[in-house]
Image (cartoon, rainbow, N blue to C red):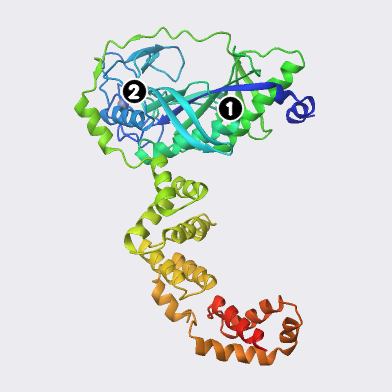
């Protein structure tokens, strides 16, 4: 029996409430590292090629603060409605590990740059707000690689990542479901990308999500024993790992077992969490103020400047799309979630005066996103051409089916919409005279369908519409054909 089956059978989940807090580390999109001038462009670089005495932790060197990294955290603070500190400080977080040459990380402990924020987003149960405890700056560690070399098991170390700027964002434990946790991480990822603070790709470690999960009987205030869950490499994994952990704890408690403080990893293969290491007590990092760096003061002018630079945030944009263009909450969400789709939508609105926004949004979230996500799609869309196409559809000048073909061709080849319409003869026949002749031919050729319709089988009209469309190679205005057919058939 799986954990999920056991939980379902015992009804364990109905008795307990989950208490979840999330810690996210985001690698900030700066040009240089946190406290030295080394480049952050380490993707595919040879091991230990992006290091200097500062990020190697050699004695006798001094760190310098990366201003851009500080500004990204302040911008994040404003974006999550947090309090941004006027004075902040750097602290040493001491621990020993081979990937940490200094024996400490420079971090922020007592005075984080941003505190007491919140982030609101939609879930399947409606809007939910996660309270954010803090957002602070720190530096990354190096990376250990364990492998076999010349028949020996060795541990190699690459310091390219050492000193990369990281923002740590910690929530209050007010998350209650695995879905809320996933949605929070997704919304934060969107926010990071929108303000340009981080690319936040989970697959390559630019965004690392850890969850603290405990459960308690519904109605009880005191927290249960919490378990830390790591190694979740996708949003799907975040939701599944937390859901698994909630069920595992419920089943264990119901079976009279106790929950141990531990760190567990998510295993994608078995879709379950596994024990990594015990966590007997909170680590004692012996924090103390970093003596090599002065406290950091943020002037009101500087803060105002950073705030003024913030782009339109996802939540504001979703609301605007709903209110100004009548999009559904779902459509606005899909659109705003995808930066390329948002840019296309905004670009087409700007390029095509009078283009119907709601129809345009349907095209972007429908055909465009389908093609853009397609296998090996190398295509692109010119916003002005999409606007032109949507205007033709809205005016009834081309049929919906043909419009999709035109769009696919434009996407693949970049050809202009007007040129495709001309070359393929897609201009819709909306001329009553031309349509009338085609309709008369079809009626004369299909007496059985005509008789069926008049005998009360109204569905027969669908067949006749199809025949007219076929006769006109799909160029007839289907709505006009339907109306004209009815007029003729109902006459006698
Ligand atoms: Zn360096």
Provide the residue designation for mark 1: 151
| Nearer to the camera, 240 or 164 | 240
Quadrant of the snapshot with the N terminus? top right
Kindly identify the residue that appears in the image at 38 percent across and 25 percent down: 162
| Nearer to the camera, 30 or 319 | 319
| Furthest-front residue in this view | 492
| Nearer to the camera, 386 or 72 | 386
Q: At numbered mark 2, what does the secondary structure look like: helix, strand or loop? A: strand
Kindly identify the residue that appears in the image at 41 percent across and 37 percent down: 191
Q: Looking at the image, can residue 435 be seen? A: yes
Provide the residue designation for mark 2: 83
User: Residue 245: which quarter of the image?
Assistant: top right
User: Residue 292: which quarter of the image?
Assistant: top left
Determine whether 215 is above or below 329 in the image: above
Whichever of callouts 1 and 2 sits on the residue coming sooner in the sequence is 2
User: Residue 356: which quarter of the image?
Assistant: bottom left
Position in image of residue 159 (x %, y %): 40, 26
Position in image of residue 313 (x %, y %): 37, 40
Q: Are marks 1 and 2 in contact (CB under 8 Å)?
A: no
Determine whether 254 is above or below 404 in the image: above
Quadrant of the snapshot with the C terminus? bottom right
Mark in front: 1 vs 2: 2
**Disc 2 C-beta below 8 A from ligand 1:** no
**Disc 1 C-beta below 8 A from ligand 1:** no
| Nearer to the camera, 376 or 210 | 210
- On the rendered structure, is 469 left or right of 113? right
Q: How far apart are the two marked residues, 1 and 2, measured between alpha carbons?
A: 55 Å
Q: Residues within 10 Å of mark 2 (few under 14, many from 20)?
A: some
On residue 165, the disc is none
Position in image of residue 359 (x %, y %): 46, 61
């Amino acid at each position: 029996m799986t954990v999920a089956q056991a939980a379902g059978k015992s009804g364990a989940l109905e008795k307990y409430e989950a208490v979840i807090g999330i810690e996210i580390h985001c690698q900030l999109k700066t040009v240089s590292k946190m406290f030295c001038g080394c480049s952050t462009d380490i993707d595919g670089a040879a091991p230990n090629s992006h290091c200097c005495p500062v990020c190697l932790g050699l004695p006798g060197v001094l760190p310098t603060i990366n201003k851009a990294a500080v500004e990204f955290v302040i911008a994040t603070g404003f974006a999550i409605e947090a309090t941004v500190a006027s004075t902040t400080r750097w602290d040493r977080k001491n621990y020993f590990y081979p990937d940490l040459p200094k024996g400490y990380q420079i971090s922020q402990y007592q005075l984080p740059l941003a505190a007491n924020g919140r982030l609101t987003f939609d879930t399947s149960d409606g809007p939910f707000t996660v309270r954010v405890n803090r957002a602070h700056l720190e530096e990354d560690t190096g990376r250990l690689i364990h492998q076999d070399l010349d028949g020996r098991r060795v541990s190699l170390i690459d310091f390219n990542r050492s000193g990369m700027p990281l923002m740590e964002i910690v929530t209050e434990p007010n998350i209650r479901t695995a879905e809320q946790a996933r949605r929070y991480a997704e919304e934060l990822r969107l926010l990071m990308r929108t303000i340009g603070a981080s690319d936040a790709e989970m697959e390559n470690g630019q965004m690392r999500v850890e969850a603290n999960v405990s459960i308690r009987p519904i109605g009880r205030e005191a927290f249960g024993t919490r378990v830390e869950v790591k190694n979740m490499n996708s949003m799907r994994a975040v939701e599944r790992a937390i859901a698994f952990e909630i069920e595992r704890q419920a089943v264990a408690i119901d079976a009279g077992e106790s929950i141990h403080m531990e760190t567990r990893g998510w295993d994608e293969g078995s879709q379950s969490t596994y024990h990594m290491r015990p966590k007997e007590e909170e680590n004692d990092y012996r924090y103390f103020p970093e003596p090599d760096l002065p406290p950091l003061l943020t002037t009101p002018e500087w803060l105002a400047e950073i705030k003024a630079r913030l782009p339109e945030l996802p939540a504001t944009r979703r609301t605007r799309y709903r209110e100004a263009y009548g999009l559904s909450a779902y459509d606005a969400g899909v659109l705003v979630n995808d930066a390329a789709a948002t840019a296309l939508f905004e670009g087409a609105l700007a390029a095509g005066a009078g283009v119907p926004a709601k129809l345009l949004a349907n095209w972007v979230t429908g055909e465009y996103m389908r093609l853009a996500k397609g296998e090996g799609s190398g295509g692109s869309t010119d916003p002005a051409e999409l606007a032109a196409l949507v205007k033709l559809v809205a005016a009834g000048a081309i049929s919906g089916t043909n419009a999709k073909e035109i769009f696919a061709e434009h996407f693949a080849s970049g050809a202009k919409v007007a040129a495709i319409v001309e070359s393929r003869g897609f201009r819709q026949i909306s001329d009553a005279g031309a349509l009338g002749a085609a309709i008369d031919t079809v009626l004369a050729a299909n007496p059985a369908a005509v008789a069926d319709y008049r005998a009360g089988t109204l569905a027969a009209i669908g067949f006749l519409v199809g025949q007219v469309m076929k006769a006109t190679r799909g160029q007839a205005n289907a709505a006009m054909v339907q109306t004209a057919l009815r007029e003729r058939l109902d006459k006698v």
